[in-house]
Image: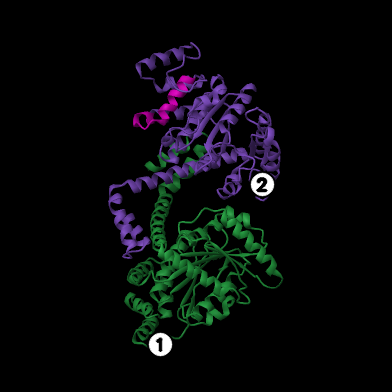
Chain colours: A purple, B green
Amino acid sequence: MHEQDGVQSPDSLSPNVAKIIKANRKKTISVDDLVSGILSGNITALSRAITLIESTNPSHTKKANEIITKCLPYSNTSIRIGITGVPGVGKSTFIEAFGIHLTSLQKKVAVLAVDPSSSLSQGSILGDKTRMEDLVKNENAFIRPSPSGNSLGGVARKTRETIILCEAAGFDTIVIETVGVGQSETAVHSMVDFFLLLKLAGAGDELQGIKRGIIEMADAIVINKADGENLKAAKLAKVEFNRALHLYPAKYSEWSPKVSLCSALKREGIAEVWNMIEDYIKTTSENKYFDTNRNNQNKFWLLQTIEDRLKSDFYNASKIKMELPQQIKLVEVGKTTPFAAAEYLLSL
Amino acid sequence: MHEQDGVQSPDSLSPNVAKIIKANRKKTISVDDLVSGILSGNITALSRAITLIESTNPSHTKKANEIITKCLPYSNTSIRIGITGVPGVGKSTFIEAFGIHLTSLQKKVAVLAVDPSSSLSQGSILGDKTRMEDLVKNENAFIRPSPSGNSLGGVARKTRETIILCEAAGFDTIVIETVGVGQSETAVHSMVDFFLLLKLAGAGDELQGIKRGIIEMADAIVINKADGENLKAAKLAKVEFNRALHLYPAKYSEWSPKVSLCSALKREGIAEVWNMIEDYIKTTSENKYFDTNRNNQNKFWLLQTIEDRLKSDFYNASKIKMELPQQIKLVEVGKTTPFAAAEYLLSL
């Protein structure tokens, strides 16, 4: 398992890799070298390219875009799984157990994260590699912390583009972790095939989950820490969540969300989660929802990107920066209406 | 009570009104005549001006904007109350009973509606005047159906502008009705001081209300049809809603939402609702939330109007109309990413 560039030895001594190392030393790796590295499954090349995606340097962005375009024909090949849950629910432990199970099935697993707050909190998720000690050592796993950034849109975009490169590098299962707060769950839900909500028995945050639409988004609710003295409460919670799920209308996917129990720590109930996901893939492949959903997600991100840019271009224009506070003031004192003020600002 | 222009006799024979009638005959009423009519409380002038607001004819819009600007200094004077509830809950009966109670307190009541679907459904709310038979006849009440329009933004804007004119015409209590479906509740919540949710006992749609954030927005939940055999169930529902409300964090308004019972048909419990609203006004005037909230609402509508226009200008541009479907297709077949497609479209 490799997480960052420049610290590991190369995976093989193929001419490609040799070239990369050489270029690396000179700090000038060409786009084509990185792409052929990625396509041959080289982790150093993949990490390097992701670093370009995450960079704010325009020349890096240009390079990153070229790499993405060249990797695109080799992407769209994995199963993308979103995992959310409040802090303390055991996400890292679960993802480690889940990842190890997947690699035991000869799968290649990439674990990414979406956490726009991590630039402030110094990486609240996936930042601490030691939390996934066993998975980190596994050569069929790749763990990458959440890119930093102030806007969810920016972080989500970087993660979406990273998915493309991971798929091109041969990862067939992408796990995307997010924290159970804010709007990041909606963003992750819009980039995955299967959305898994991790819960604890008796946490009492059901209302919160219903209110914020998280339960509605979930394809599975997995109750973690279902072991020892917790087991009875967990079984009860399973009945309750099943009842809650029945209150929702049927999903377009025609998939009825399932509730299951697990103990990530004891690595129990993990295989069942994967079997459930396989069932989901079967159901949604047969009824064509799987592809429809990916197309809708692409359309969503296309429009979302446009709309974010329209707004940021408008509000960052110097005229608007100067005049907006004044117009807000005029509306406040009743000298103009919000609509007239908007017209005025739009006419600048 | 007058609802549309041109069918009623004038309220008085003041020189202003005579002028309006004369102009009306010639079909050319000046902005100044309409404004002075509105400010003298003339309903025909008010109705005429609202018709200009609702028109899609650009010359009407120009006139409407001038009228709004001239009325603005006389607005911001009423209490604005939003009322929502699913079809069948008895909204019309409640608003009639409530409006009659208010007029008995010497108040002048305007009843407006936000229902973007009404252009399709031929006016599902307030369209049928006969549903408020008694209020319609009351000379201190003014009922105006929801303006037609395809976009919620457009309908909401027209209603916001109509509020200004109603306030300038001396209406001190504005009731804004909306249907309990779609996003129209959020829009109405963003234009009123007090938001009232009308419910029935045992309707079993609590989850729906929590999910869609309606209960969270409510300043009061009023359980209607609390009479006869329903009374016991209504009392039970009151306890349950009180419990549900306690699960929410305290509001910025420092107002704890209340639950009360009423029978709109028997006109029982109506005075209590108004007393509750008076309490709310007292609380939020003292802690300054009342004005803060109106300022925030103005800011919200200002930004919302800008963002709606940025989007509609972009998507309606002929280049984008031509190229967008093509880019969506290219994303679908994996020839480009949503982000690259967005960049391309933004560069046109």
Which corner quadrant of the image does residue A139 belong to?
Answer: top right
Q: Position of residue B213 (x, y in %)?
A: 55, 55
Q: Mark 2 or mark 1: which is in front? A: 2
Mark 2 neighbour class, 10 Å CA radius: few under 14, some 14 to 19, many 20 or more = many
As rendered, which of A260 and B159 lies closer to the eye?
A260
Separation of disc 2 and disc 1 at Cα?
A: 62 Å
Q: Is residue A334 above or below residue A215?
A: below
Q: Position of residue A31 (x, y in %)?
A: 41, 23
Q: Secondary structure at mark 2?
A: helix
Q: Are marks 2 and 1 on the same chain?
A: no
Q: Residue at x 56, y 54 (%)?
A: B212
Amino acid under disc 2? Leu
Q: Is residue A286 visible?
A: no
Looking at the rendered structure, which numbered label has been put on residue B12? 1
Image quadrant holding the C terminus of chain A, namely: bottom left
Q: Which residue occupies the extreme front position in the image?
A: A229
For mark 1, name the chain: B
Amino acid under disc 1? Ser
Dominant secondary structure of the magenta stretch?
Answer: helix
Residue A49 shown in magenta: yes
Which corner quadrant of the image does residue B301 belong to?
Answer: bottom left
Q: Residue at x 46, y 16 (%)?
A: A8
For mark 2, name the chain: A
Q: Which residues are magenta?
A: A43-62
Q: Is residue B156 visible?
A: yes
Q: Position of residue A93 (x, y in %)?
A: 58, 29
Please name the residue that numbered disc 2 is placed on: A245
* Horizontal arrangement in the rendering, residue A317 relative to residue A210 (left or right): left
Residue A315 shown in magenta: no
